[in-house]
C-alpha cells in the first residue's frame, strides 16, 4: 500500500523569454487527494506540473514534497516515487512491454517488478509482457505507461493530458480505471486536463488557472453550483450545455 505524499507550491514563478508562464502560484495538495489543473492553452498548467519532478526549474518560489524542498534534492532522487504519465506515453519502441515496465527499477537499482501483476493491475493480460509497443493500441500503450509508473513504487502521480489522444470510449474506460487505482492504492494525483467534464468526474478538487495564476480552487460540487467564480463557471458551462442538449435529444 502506498504512503500518499503531499505537495506544496509557495509563490512559484516561471518565466520563458519575455513571458511569465507561472506567476506566483501558492497551493497545498494534501496526501491522498486527486487534484485536476484546468484552464485554457497557455494557462501554465503543464509548467506547474513539471516543476514538481524537476523537469522544469522555477525561477522563484519553493516546491516541497512532504515538507522537503525539491530544489535541495537531486532530480533522480526527487523522481523516485513519482509517476509521470503524459499524452504521448513515451514507451521505448525498441523495448518489449516487460522491459518498458521494468526500466525504472533497472535504472534505479531496485527490485525487478512482477510485470504480469502490474499488467493485470491496469487491466491488461499477463501475456502482453512479450509484445512490442507498436503492437498495442493507443489505450493499451497508455495502460502500460501507467503500469510503468506504478511499478517504480510511485505514490505521487503526475498526469499531463493522459487520455487526450484516445477515442471517447477508451478514454472513459481508462479514466474510470485510473480513478479506481488512485483510490485502491491511496495515491496522490495531480492531473492536467483541458476537459472540464473529465475533471469534474475524476477529481476531488479542481484548480483553474489563467495567465499563470490560480483563478479558482474548489470541489466539483461547488463548481457545479456556480460558486467558484466567473472563470470556473465559464468552463463548467460547456459540459452543462452538452448535457442539456443530449437530454433534449433524448426527449425528442
Image: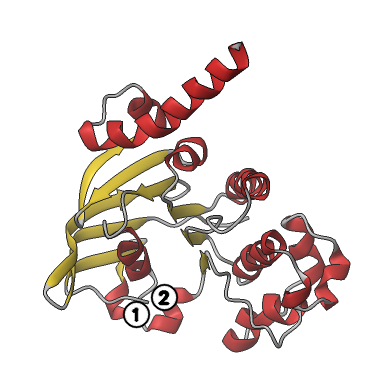
Quarter-of-image position of residue 56 = bottom left
Residue 73's label in the rendered image is 1
What is the CA distance from the residue labelled 1 to the residue labelled 2? Answer: 6 Å
Q: Residue at x 30, y 63 (%)?
A: 48
Is residue 197 visible in the rendered structure shown here?
A: yes
- Residue 24 picture location, percent across and down: 15, 59
Q: Residue furthest front?
A: 252
Tell me: 128 left or right of 173.
right
Residue 104's label in the rendered image is none
Is residue 219 visible in the rendered structure shown here?
A: no
The residue closer to the viewer here, 27 or 166, is 166
Q: Residue at x 36, y 41 (%)?
A: 206
Q: Are marks 1 and 2 in contact (CB under 8 Å)?
A: yes
The residue closer to the viewer here, 212 or 13, is 212
The residue closer to the viewer here, 129 or 212, is 212
Q: Mark 2 highlights which residue?
A: 78
Location of the C terminus (image quadrant): top right
Amino acid at each position: 500500500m502506498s504512503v500518499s505524499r503531499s505537495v506544496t507550491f509557495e509563490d512559484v514563478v516561471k518565466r520563458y523569454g519575455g513571458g511569465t508562464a507561472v506567476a506566483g502560484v501558492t497551493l497545498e495538495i494534501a496526501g491522498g487527494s486527486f487534484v485536476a489543473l484546468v484552464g485554457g492553452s497557455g494557462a501554465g498548467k503543464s509548467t506547474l506540473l513539471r516543476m514538481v519532478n524537476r523537469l522544469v526549474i522555477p525561477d522563484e518560489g519553493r516546491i516541497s514534497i512532504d515538507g522537503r524542498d525539491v530544489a535541495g534534492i537531486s532530480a533522480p532522487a526527487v523522481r523516485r516515487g513519482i509517476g509521470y504519465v503524459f499524452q504521448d506515453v513515451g514507451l521505448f519502441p525498441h523495448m518489449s512491454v516487460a522491459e518498458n515496465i521494468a526500466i525504472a527499477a533497472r535504472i534505479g537499482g531496485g527490485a525487478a517488478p512482477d510485470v504480469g501483476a502490474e499488467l493485470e493491475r491496469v487491466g491488461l493480460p499477463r501475456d502482453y509482457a512479450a509484445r512490442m509497443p507498436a503492437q498495442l493500441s493507443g489505450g493499451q500503450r497508455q495502460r502500460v505507461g501507467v503500469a510503468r509508473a506504478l511499478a517504480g513504487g510511485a505514490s505521487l502521480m503526475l498526469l499531463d493530458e493522459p487520455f487526450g489522444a484516445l477515442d471517447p470510449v477508451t478514454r472513459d474506460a481508462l479514466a474510470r480505471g485510473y480513478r479506481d487505482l488512485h483510490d485502491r492504492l491511496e495515491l496522490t494525483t495531480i492531473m492536467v486536463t483541458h476537459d472540464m467534464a473529465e475533471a469534474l468526474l475524476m477529481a476531488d478538487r479542481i484548480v483553474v488557472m489563467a495567465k499563470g495564476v490560480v483563478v479558482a480552487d474548489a470541489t466539483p460540487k461547488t463548481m457545479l453550483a456556480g460558486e467558484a467564480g466567473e472563470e470556473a463557471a465559464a468552463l463548467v458551462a460547456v459540459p452543462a450545455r452538452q448535457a442539456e442538449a443530449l437530454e433534449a435529444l433524448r426527449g425528442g
